[in-house]
Image: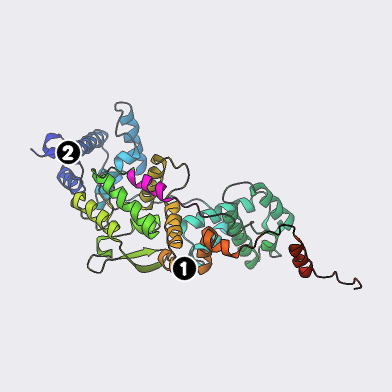
């Protein structure tokens, strides 16, 4: 008997049960998970029927009212996250309206600034929200025309010790520049905003030693599907230096098995890299056990719905593996550093490493020159021991002070 036939549903959602069950089954839900979702649908349908609520009126406020009622009688499936699958399905078939985004009430000046950011500057909505927050704080407590460089300096001081200070300064400059261009401030106050301190290449890349890499890979239980997936993910990062987003973006169409290459997409660039034998074997071992899925992504989530995992999943895989191996710091990017360091130790040039890591500028790769101890050792000169020859050599290098008679 089908799971949908075991759960009795009455009310306005009866006609949607079969379609919803079919979609969850296609997404890989187990019988138990499917039954739990259908019981939630049955409860929602009874609540709608008893309250006389039409499906078209199932707005977020009413969903929260249903959950408040359910929390009084249930301990599971009582959150917005639990409601997401059924609401997503009902919206996809047009039974429930899509939620209307809540727009914050802004002053006329901030509304103009928002239109400037989104329409003229092409700023992403998430970053535009940050810029608008900074602009609101900049304009709080006084007239725009009365802003002075001292006001800007005081505002900067209050944020100097907070996280994300550099991005905050960028947003502040954008707001002040807009105010000046629009004639709201008599002078360009962007010059009162200091630059955030930034020292390039002040630290060494924290690469793993070979024994540590082996320990990280050994944490994957390769008799399970999840273990095989994690092993393939870690190998891609530690052997080819792929970023977490690049691993998550891999699709089945990106792997050319005959040519032994993969297509890597990330940070606005696309390139092809050779696929090492051990990496290819690890991917094949995972794909053979992965099961069927409509998703073309190589690496799927371990729980239904079985879609492609995002970069956050890849980051978590690397973080967990390093902690299980006893390595207390670092994550996905540390594996990328390890790949670059290993290539350098095997004789690869910085140009070759830059090509593998897909760096746009060779300066980005130059930091790995610091870990080339053999190459640096040849540049180091012996320290003078204090003998007569060393003293004469040092005296020959000394230049007379200007203005002193010889």
Magenta-colored stretch includes residue 192: no
Foreground mark, 2 or 1, reads 1
- Magenta region: 204-218
Q: Can you name the residue that lies furthest to the right here?
A: 405
**How far across and how far down the image is residue 5, in percent?**
11, 37
Determine which residue is flagged by label 1: 349
Q: Which secondary structure dominates the residues rendered in magenta?
A: helix
List x then y, in percent, for residue 360: 47, 68
Question: Which residue occupies the extreme top position in the image?
Answer: 73
Q: Secondary structure at mark 2?
A: helix
- Cα–Cα span, label 2 and label 1: 55 Å
Q: Where does the image place residue 116, in percent across and percent down from the top left?
A: 53, 64
Q: Is residue 215 magenta?
A: yes
The residue tagged 2 is: 31
Q: Nearer the viewer, residue 263 or 33?
A: 263
Asked whether 61 or 324 is in front, the reply is: 324
Name the residue nearer the viewer: 27 or 183. 27
């Amino acid at each position: 008997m089908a799971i949908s036939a075991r759960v009795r549903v009455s009310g306005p959602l009866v006609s949607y049960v079969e379609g919803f069950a079919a979609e969850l089954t296609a997404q890989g839900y187990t019988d138990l998970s499917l039954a739990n979702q259908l019981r939630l649908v049955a409860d929602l349908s009874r609540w709608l029927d008893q309250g006389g609520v039409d499906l078209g009126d199932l707005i977020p406020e009413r969903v929260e009212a249903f959950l408040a009622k359910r929390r009084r009688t249930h301990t599971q499936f009582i959150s917005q996250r639990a409601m997401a699958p059924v609401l997503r399905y009902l919206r996809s078939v047009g039974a429930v309206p899509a939620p209307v985004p809540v727009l914050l009430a802004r002053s006329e000046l901030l509304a103009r600034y928002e239109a400037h950011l989104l329409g003229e500057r092409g700023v992403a909505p998430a970053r535009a929200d940050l810029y608008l927050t900074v602009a609101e704080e900049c304009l709080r407590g006084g007239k725009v025309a009365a802003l002075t460089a001292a006001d800007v300096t005081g505002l900067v001081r209050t944020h100097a010790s907070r996280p994300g200070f550099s991005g905050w300064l960028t947003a502040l400059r954008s707001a002040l520049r807009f105010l000046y261009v629009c004639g709201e401030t008599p002078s360009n106050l962007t010059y009162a905003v200091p630059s955030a301190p930034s020292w390039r290449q002040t630290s060494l890349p924290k690469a793993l030693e070979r024994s540590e890499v082996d320990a990280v890979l050994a944490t994957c239980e390769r008799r399970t599907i999840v273990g095989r997936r994690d092993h393939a993910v870690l190998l891609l990062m530690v052997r080819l230096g792929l970023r977490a987003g690049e691993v998550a973006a891999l699709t089945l169409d990106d792997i050319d098995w005959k040519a032994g290459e993969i297509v890597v997409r990330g940070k606005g660039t696309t390139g092809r890299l050779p696929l090492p034998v051990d990496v290819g074997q690890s991917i094949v071992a995972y794909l053979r056990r992965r099961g069927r899925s409509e998703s073309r992504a190589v690496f799927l989530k371990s729980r239904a719905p079985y879609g492609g995992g995002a970069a956050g999943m890849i980051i978590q895989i690397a973080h967990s593996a390093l902690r299980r191996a006893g390595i207390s710091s670092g994550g996905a990017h540390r594996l990328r550093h390890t790949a670059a360091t290993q290539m350098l130790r095997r004789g690869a040039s910085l140009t070759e490493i830059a090509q593998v890591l897909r760096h746009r500028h060779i300066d980005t790769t130059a930091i790995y020159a610091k870990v080339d101890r053999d190459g640096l050792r040849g540049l180091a000169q012996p320290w003078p021991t204090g003998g007569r020859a060393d003293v004469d050599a040092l005296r020959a290098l000394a230049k007379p002070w200007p203005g002193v008679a010889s």
